[in-house]
Amino acid sequence: MKTLILAIAFLAGSTAVIASGDEGKKDLNVDTSKSQIEWVGKKVTGQHQGTLDIKSGTLSVVDGMIESANITIDMSSIMVTDEGMDDETKGNLKGHLSSPDFFNVAEHSSASFQLTSFKPMKGENGANYVISGKLTIKGITNDISFPAKVDMSKGGVSASGNLVIDRSKWDIRYGSGSFFDNLGDKVIYDDVEIGFNLVASSK
């Protein structure tokens, strides 16, 4: 249940050629209405899942290649979407995830992803780029890398993919067997699964 965000990180994916033959610089905005981040957190007794919203995102494309990419994630938007869970329980879990036990949203309302590099690849599930960047959560920044499927058109970029982050690297320790002993079936695993679909188009 610790997500992430970020994220997020898609953009790197968008780091592909936008339109071969398009010269000069293009600035793209992430379409927040068409983009989504999903998360899954697992524990000994089951799992929780939900979504996060992209607050904003920009890409700069120079001579058909991505020069920079930055995304901001709205941590206050975290939602729980577990099937079969009533609204009150979902609200309570959202509140716990927003608390200092997890993301401390009151003090860290945003997370971010900054692209550092991308490399072409041939992978499974259609992934064609390896994306690398810096993911910041709770004011803590770590490097991440993940595969993404990137589709390009003259008008913009779409990207999708899945990655796993270790929440303990961002000081999210609640229920972690890496920091606490004798938790028994209360253990919440450190790995958080993130899936994303993002769309970016010309400003």
Image: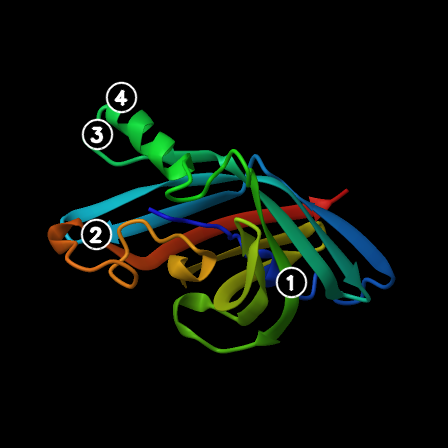
At 26% across and 36% down in the image, what residue appears? 82
Q: Is residue 156 left or right of residue 150?
A: right
Q: In the rendered structure, which amino acid carries the disc numbered 3?
A: Met
Q: In the rendered structure, which amino acid carries the disc numbered 2?
A: Lys
Q: In the rendered structure, which amino acid carries the disc numbered 4?
A: Glu
* Label 4 vs label 1, nearer the camera: 4
Assess disc 1: are there few (<14), some (14-19) or many (≥20) residues with their C-alpha within 10 Å of its C-alpha.
Answer: many
Q: CA distance from mark 4 to mark 3?
A: 8 Å
Q: Is residue 189 left or right of residue 76?
A: left
Q: CA distance from mark 1 to mark 3?
A: 36 Å
Q: Mark 4 or mark 2: which comes first in sequence?
A: 2
56 vs 169, nearest the viewer: 169
At 52% across and 77% down in the image, what residue appears? 121
Res 167 visible: yes
| Residue contact at pointers 2 and 1, CB within 8 angstroms | no
140 vs 120, nearest the viewer: 140
Q: In the structure shown, which secondary structural element does the residue marked by tag 1 occupy?
A: strand
Q: Residue furthest right?
A: 24
- State the residue position of label 2: 43
Residue 173: x %, y % from top left:
35, 53
Q: Mark 3 or mark 2: which comes first in sequence?
A: 2
Assess disc 3: are there few (<14), some (14-19) or many (≥20) residues with their C-alpha within 10 Å of its C-alpha.
Answer: few
- State the residue position of label 4: 88
Assess disc 4: are there few (<14), some (14-19) or many (≥20) residues with their C-alpha within 10 Å of its C-alpha.
Answer: few
Instruction: Check the image and report above or below for 186 versus 33.
Output: below
Instruction: Check the image and report above or below for 164 versus 79.
Output: below
- State the residue position of label 3: 85
Q: CA distance from mark 2 to mark 1?
A: 31 Å
- State the residue position of label 1: 115
Q: How is the image coloured?
A: rainbow
Please tell me the numbered disc located at residue 62. Answer: none
